[in-house]
Image (cartoon, rainbow, N blue to C red):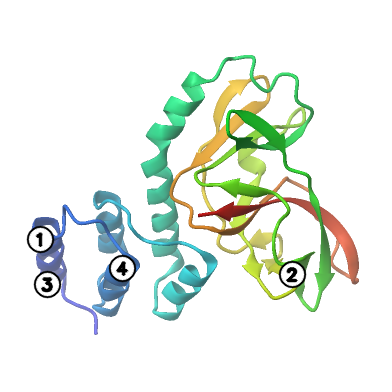
C-alpha cells in the first residue's frame, strides 16, 4: 500500500528528527520501500543521512528482491560517491603533478605509497554471461579503492565503467544487455596530469570489481575470448 503524500511527509520528518544522526542502513531503505514511500522521498533520505549501507553484489540483489527500484539503487551509489569525494579531493591535491606521467596507457592501483599495474584479464562469452576465469582477481587491493588511469588520446575517464562481478566457485561473471552493464558504480575522476586521473572510492564493500575501458568487448555471437577487463579483489 502506498502512503498518502501527507503521510509520506510526516514519515520523512520523523526520520529527520529521530534518525537524522544515525547512519542509513540497507534494512532502513527496505523498510521505506515496503512502506510505499515514493522514490523521490527515499532519495531525499539517502542524500541527507550518513551512509552505512552495503552495496556488494549480493546486497544489490537483495535490495531488488525487496522492491527497490533502479532509481533508489543509483541514489545509494551516488551517495557513496559524494561521501568519498572530499577525501578524493584531498588525495588528488596532495599528489605531485608529475605523478603518473611516466606510466603507459592503462590502470594502476595504490599499493602503500606507490602504484602497481592492474594487468587485464581475458573475458569469455559463455551461456549468456561474460565470464572471467578464477573466482578471484590476481590484483588484491586494500580498502579504500584508489585507482590511477592513464587514458588513450581522445578518451575521457567517464567512458570507463566500474561494476561488481558476481563470484562463482570457479569464475567471476557479469551480464550486459545491448552494451548496458547492470549495477555500474558512478565515480568522480580527479585530473592530476595529461590524460591521468585518480579514482578513489572509500565506501565500496569487499568483493570482486571490474573497470571496463570503452570498446573493450567485441561481438558475443560465438563462444570464446572476446575482450579484456581490469579487475581487482577488494580486501576488507
- Residue 35: quarter of image: bottom left
Q: Which residue is mark 3?
A: 7
Q: Note whether residue 218 is visible.
A: no
Residue 180 left/right relative to 45: right
Tell me, yes or no, whether the two marked residues, 4 and 2, touch with CB atoms within 8 Å: no
Q: Earlier in the sequence, mark 1 or mark 2?
A: 1
Residue depth check, mark 1 versus mark 2: number of the one nearer the observer: 2
Residue 29 tag number: 4
Mark 3, residues whose alpha carbon is within 10 Å: few (<14), some, or many (≥20)?
few
What is the CA distance from the residue labelled 3 to the residue labelled 2? Answer: 47 Å
Count residues near mark 2 (Cα–Cα under 10 Å), then give few for <14, some for 14-19, many for 20+.
some
Q: Which residue is mark 1?
A: 18
Expressed as whole percent of the image width and height from the top left, the position of residue 140 reads 65, 50
- Closer to us: 84 or 1: 84
**Residue 166, image x, y percentages:** 63, 69
Task: Give the residue displayed 8% in from the left and 57% down from the top.
Answer: 17
Marks 1 and 2: CB-CB under 8 Å? no
Q: Marks 2 and 3: in contact by CB < 8 Å?
A: no
Find out whether the residues at labels 1 and 3 contact each other: C-beta distance under 8 Å.
no
Q: Nearer the viewer, mark 4 or mark 2?
A: 2
- Distance between the alpha carbons at the discs numbered 4 and 2: 31 Å
Q: Secondary structure at mark 3?
A: helix
| 10 Å crowding of disc 1: few (<14), some (14-19), many (20+) | few
For the residue pair 118 and 125, the one nearer the viewer reads as 118
Amino acid at each position: 500500500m502506498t502512503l498518502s503524500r501527507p503521510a509520506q511527509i510526516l514519515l520523512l520528518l520523523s526520520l529527520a528528527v529521530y534518525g537524522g544522526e544515525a547512519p542509513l542502513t540497507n534494512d532502513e531503505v527496505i523498510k521505506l520501500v515496503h512502506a510505499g514511500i515514493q522514490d523521490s522521498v527515499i532519495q531525499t533520505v539517502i542524500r541527507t543521512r550518513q551512509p552505512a549501507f552495503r552495496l556488494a553484489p549480493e546486497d544489490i540483489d537483495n535490495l531488488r528482491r525487496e522492491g527497490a527500484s533502479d532509481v533508489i539503487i543509483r541514489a545509494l551509489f551516488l551517495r557513496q560517491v559524494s561521501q568519498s569525494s572530499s577525501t578524493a579531493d584531498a588525495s588528488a591535491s596532495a599528489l605531485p603533478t608529475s605523478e603518473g606521467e611516466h606510466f603507459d596507457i592503462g590502470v594502476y592501483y595504490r599499493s602503500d605509497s606507490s602504484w602497481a599495474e592492474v594487468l587485464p584479464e581475458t573475458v569469455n562469452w559463455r551461456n549468456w554471461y561474460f565470464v572471467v576465469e578464477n573466482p578471484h582477481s590476481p590484483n588484491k587491493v586494500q580498502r579504500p579503492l584508489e585507482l590511477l588511469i592513464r587514458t588513450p588520446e581522445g578518451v575521457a575517464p567517464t567512458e570507463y565503467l566500474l561494476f561488481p562481478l558476481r563470484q562463482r566457485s570457479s569464475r567471476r561473471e557479469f551480464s550486459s544487455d545491448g552494451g548496458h552493464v547492470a549495477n555500474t558504480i558512478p565515480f568522480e575522476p580527479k585530473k592530476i596530469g595529461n590524460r591521468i586521473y585518480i579514482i578513489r572510492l572509500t565506501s565500496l564493500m569487499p568483493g570482486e570489481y571490474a573497470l571496463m575501458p570503452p570498446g573493450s568487448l567485441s561481438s558475443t555471437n560465438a563462444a570464446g575470448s572476446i575482450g579484456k577487463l581490469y579487475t581487482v579483489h577488494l580486501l576488507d
